[in-house]
Image (cartoon, coloured by chain):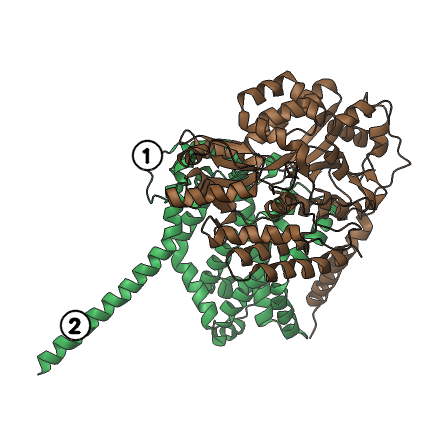
Chain colours: A brown, B green
Amino acid sequence: MRTARSVFCRLVGIGMLAVLIGTPYLTGGSPSFAALAVDVDLTKPVNITFWHIYSAGDAQALTGLIGLFHKKYPTIAINAQFVAGYGQLHQKIVAALQANQPPNIALAYENDVVEYSKSGQVVDLTPYSASPQNGLDKASLADIIPIELYRNTYRALGTRYYSWPWTAAVAVMYYNKAMLAKVGTQTPPATWEAFTKTCEALKKQLGKACYAIAIDASTFNDVGFSYGGRILQPGGKATDFGSSAWTATLRLHRLLVDQGYGYPTTGRAEIAFADQQDFANQQVAFIIRTSRSIPYVKQIVGTQFDWGVAIPPRAEWVGHPVTVLYGPNVTVFKGSPEQQLASWLFARFASSAEGQAYWATHTGNLPTRLSTAKQDEYRQFLQKEPRFKAAFDALPYGQFEGLVYDRQLVAVLPTRLRTLIEDTETALLTKAIGVSEAQARLKDQGNQIVSDATK
Amino acid sequence: MQSGALVGWRTRRHALHLLWHGAMLSICLVVFFPFFWMLSMSLKTLAEALSVPPSALPRHPDLSNYLAAWHAAPFARYYANSFLVASATAAATVVTASLAGYGLVRGDFPGRRVLLLLVLASVMIPFEATFIPNFVLITRLHWYDTFAALIIPWTTSAFSIFLFRQAYLAIPADIYEAALMDGCTEGRIFRSVAFPLSRAAVVTVFLLSYLWSWNALLWPILVTSSADMRVVQLGLFQFQTEGGVYVNLLMAAVALSILPIIVIFLLSQRLLVEGISKGAIR
């Protein structure tokens, strides 16, 4: 028998359900803005939020950078919010875009920006950069490393700047000078041929492997680029993994493990950066890593042995050094005209020679402008720190992994492709598959992935 | 002959005991080793923590890592937030799950079985499939960067409801009947009979909810922005940089972060084991 109480409880339950379902429609609604002007008045205080992943010393450097910016633009307050790592940052931005509450500016890689742009909330920075009042003149634009501007230009989105250079890093070879000296080598090998000869000498004379191979798509691509290879064929519809450059890349990797010159750090916790650990403990003479690791390696090696940094080796027939360019950019999301301009001004300041000199000196990142080296602060830093100088000298040779061609297409390297590269590299280096099978796998599955990504 | 058999039997019994204790000791060592390693790493310098081959014990134990870890982020605030959120979430989960579990046992309404299946099926929905719509709802409710966002969405769980249901099913039906005959309403039976008798389940649900809430990372990252609202797990990210992980400081911070959980567990382990085993048997 239904009592009044049970009927009441049922009605309450139905009501709660209605509230839960209906609330988004009652309280939601996306913000709308009138047509936005670029050069608006910023004499009144503006607050913007910046989502980033910097902790410890880098967070302090960011605070310092924001302080410098605030001196120039006292009405702009930046609320910099730490969001753990890049994965968490990406998830938070995706969720925030769905809720129409993104930050004003955030760190982002190119593939992230392409994804965010689907929300319609990423600001086109092209008119800001071209503004006579708040933009950059031709000389300033030309001062930015060309590949940095290139990778922030989204050709598939109308050849516009949907992000802006923030910081850079390159793949470098860390080498143990003491170990090389023991086998009579004073300079790091510049070619893969010299590299394998050095490894042979280290193996024979010291009984040690010479290279701890971190399983990483970017490092693998660096080797491929150093053989003259590329990721995609012109047109961007298929990969270039079937070419002789990648055959040579795979053969080199296999030779290193077959001869005992190198070993993969597969199976060891990647978060522990196993190859760095082995390098610091003089288990190997070489590792190839991002230049961002220089401060960390400096700490873990201490004064145990002398070590240096050099651009990674290349094939003998490739006439110039080659490396891979890393580093996030910043992207601006839609807000009020004042917030958007304030965000652009911060991105512009951060990419200026002054901002880059401060940031690079205090974090160990590399600048996105070559003229940064003329700033006293950074020039003195490079004089005191030859390892960073070596990384800086490698900057002009950095290649962008998402680079495509004259056909003006942008295909950023999808995560699936990176996973394929790393899985194939693992299988090759653990001798589960041979060179031919590895190359066939990269080519066939890679083409399928690119085809799916460019539909 | 009889004494010989007795001696043989005793010897076998001792041998079995030794084997049993040996096996248990091995399992304990395996389980305890990560904690030992965490403490060992937390007392080393960074270089020593990354040394190859690794050393079991620190050469020069250094407690300064704990101070450095504590000062790397506002951990006092993070601790307070985690404690508040975990306590409130666990307490609320006990309330809601116990009521829901009781309703699923004692309720007599159409679709009760279907409702139970739906509750259990919800366990299979991963967090990654729901965090975006949940985040949108949080922003629509203007709960972003508030304790409400950290606590309210987690004030019940299907697993907790299931545990309580099993605990109430374990109570003999005669006890419910006797209470009814004494004139108790269902509410009174719940308050005075069922809930007190489900003490083990209460402790289990409280502890598990506390643990899950304490360890949560992605949801607090999503729904908070100000430093005042952050929790302990986010503080651990301070030691993971683009260049490498400061494992010694990270382990010190981890040791600090799990300390409250360990203390609570040690104080209530008997009831926790009892609660889980009763649910499993039923």
Q: Is residue A69 above or below residue B138?
A: above
- State the mark number for residue A279: none
Residue of label 1 = B60
**Residue lying furthest right:** A35
For badge 1, the amino acid type reads: His
Q: Is residue A1 above or below residue A81?
A: below
Mark 1 or mark 2: whose residue is earlier in sequence: 2
Q: Is residue B67 above or below residue B152?
A: above
Which type of secondary structure does the marked residue at label 1 adopt?
Answer: loop
Q: Is residue A272 visible?
A: no
- Residue shown at 80% from the left, 32% from the top: A340
Chain on which label 2 sits: B
Residue A5 picture quarter:
bottom right
Question: Quick one: B136 or A299, which is closer to the camera?
Answer: A299
Which type of secondary structure does the marked residue at label 2 adopt?
Answer: helix
**Residue lying furthest front:** A317
- Residue shown at 56% from the left, 20% from the top: A383
- Residue shown at 46% from the left, 48% from the top: A261
Chain on which label 1 sits: B
Residue of label 2 = B11
Q: Mark 1 or mark 2, which is nearer to you?
A: 1
User: Are the residues under marks 1 and 2 on the same chain?
Assistant: yes
**Residue lying furthest top:** A376
Where in the figure is residue A67, as x and y percent of width and height? 66, 22
For badge 2, the amino acid type reads: Thr
Question: Quick one: A428 or A134, which is closer to the camera?
Answer: A428
Where in the figure is residue A206, as x and y percent of width and height? 38, 42
Q: Residues within 10 Å of mark 1 (few under 14, many from 20)?
A: few
